[in-house]
Amino acid sequence: MNLAIDVGGSNLRAQIWDGNIHIDSMSTKSKNIGVAAWIESILSKHKRITTIGIAYAGQVEDGSIISAPNLNIDKKDIKKFFESNYDVTLKIENDLTCAVMAEAKYHNSKNICALYLGTGLGLGVVESGKILRGSHNIAAELGHIPYKESPFKCGCGRSNCIELFASGIALRKWIQHYAINCEPKLSELKKISDNKIADIFEEALLYAVGTAITLFNPDVLVLGGGIVSANPYLLEMITENIDKHALPQALKDIEICTSNIDGAPLQGALLLKDYND
Ligand SMILES: [Zn+2]
């Protein structure tokens, strides 16, 4: 049986499959339990699991967790730990790498970007059919490109990351900063008359999407994540304004769309068992 795990900043999700048959799904809050401890509890109940694929909201390299600005890490050498203590093979990749793998399969595209807005802002890139990795598997960390000075510190230690302007974390921090009585949701902020936080968010998102398109020239740019699915207007906002933020030639024939996959990082985690590069 195959275990797929999506480790997000807020939730841990898992699915167990036996070939094409869905056996079980489970989830818990990320703050409740470490990833390794959670996997051990799943393995104790499902003894026939032989492969584990993890989509991880942080930087990973060669089966080890390097850093995770928004998560607590209970086991850094996670591949080594499980493969030496259990009869399993384990693959772990960045969650956006997993998301873009699932999106590339869905769109049958060899040049595709997946830009996800959830707790953080993440990007995954498939270029000429291959995952873009860089020398230490941290290429395309779009959320941490310098954008503007903010009054807050990012999980990475700096205070000018674009994630501090367009992400779930950003909404919480700016609402606190301006002492606005509102839920940390973009849809709620859009309802109140003073929209400065929504404006900050939208401007940064346009900058991020334009940067991804100019740098990677994809056929398809897929927007996903909780904030995108809760705010369908964002797609229209982007398609109407993106010409001011991306190189015109890079916009030629591009398809900008929202994700149609239910849980792309988790679906990508399931694909890991068959992926070699
Ligand atoms: Zn950062």
Image: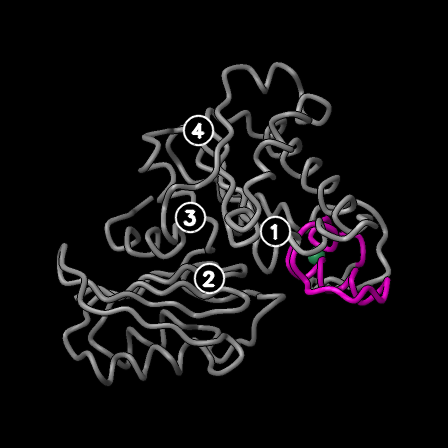
* Residue 111 image label: 4
SS state under label 2: strand
* Residue 199 image label: none
Q: Nearer the viewer, mark 2 or mark 1?
A: 1
User: Disc 3 to disc 4, how far (Cα)?
Assistant: 14 Å
**What's the residue at 66%, 33% (across, down)?**
211
Q: Quadrant of residue 205?
A: top right
Q: Quadrant of the N terminus?
A: bottom left
The image shows residue 62 at horizontal and vertical percentages of: 42, 59
User: Disc 4 to disc 1, how far (Cα)?
Assistant: 20 Å
Is the residue marked by circle 4 packed among few (<14), some (14-19), or many (20+) residues within 10 Å? many
137 over 33 or under it: above or below: above
40 over 19 or under it: above or below: below
Residue linked to disc 1: 121
Compare residues 234 and 273 and report the one nearer the observer.
234
Q: Does residue 277 appear left or right of residue 94 in this picture?
A: left
User: Disc 3 to disc 1, how far (Cα)?
Assistant: 13 Å
SS state under label 4: loop
Q: Earlier in the sequence, mark 4 or mark 1?
A: 4
Segment colored magenta: 159-185
**Mark 3 within 8 Å of ligand 1, using the beta carbon:** no
* Total residue callouts: 4
Is the residue marked by circle 2 packed among few (<14), some (14-19), or many (20+) residues within 10 Å? many
Residue type at tag 1 = Leu
Residue type at tag 2 = Tyr
Compare residues 134 and 224 and report the one nearer the observer.
224
**Mark 1 within 8 Å of ligand 1, using the beta carbon:** no
**CB under 8 Å between discs 2 and 1:** no
Q: Does residue 97 appear left or right of residue 184 in this picture?
A: left
Residue linked to disc 2: 56
Compare residues 208 and 215 and report the one nearer the observer.
208
Residue linked to disc 3: 99
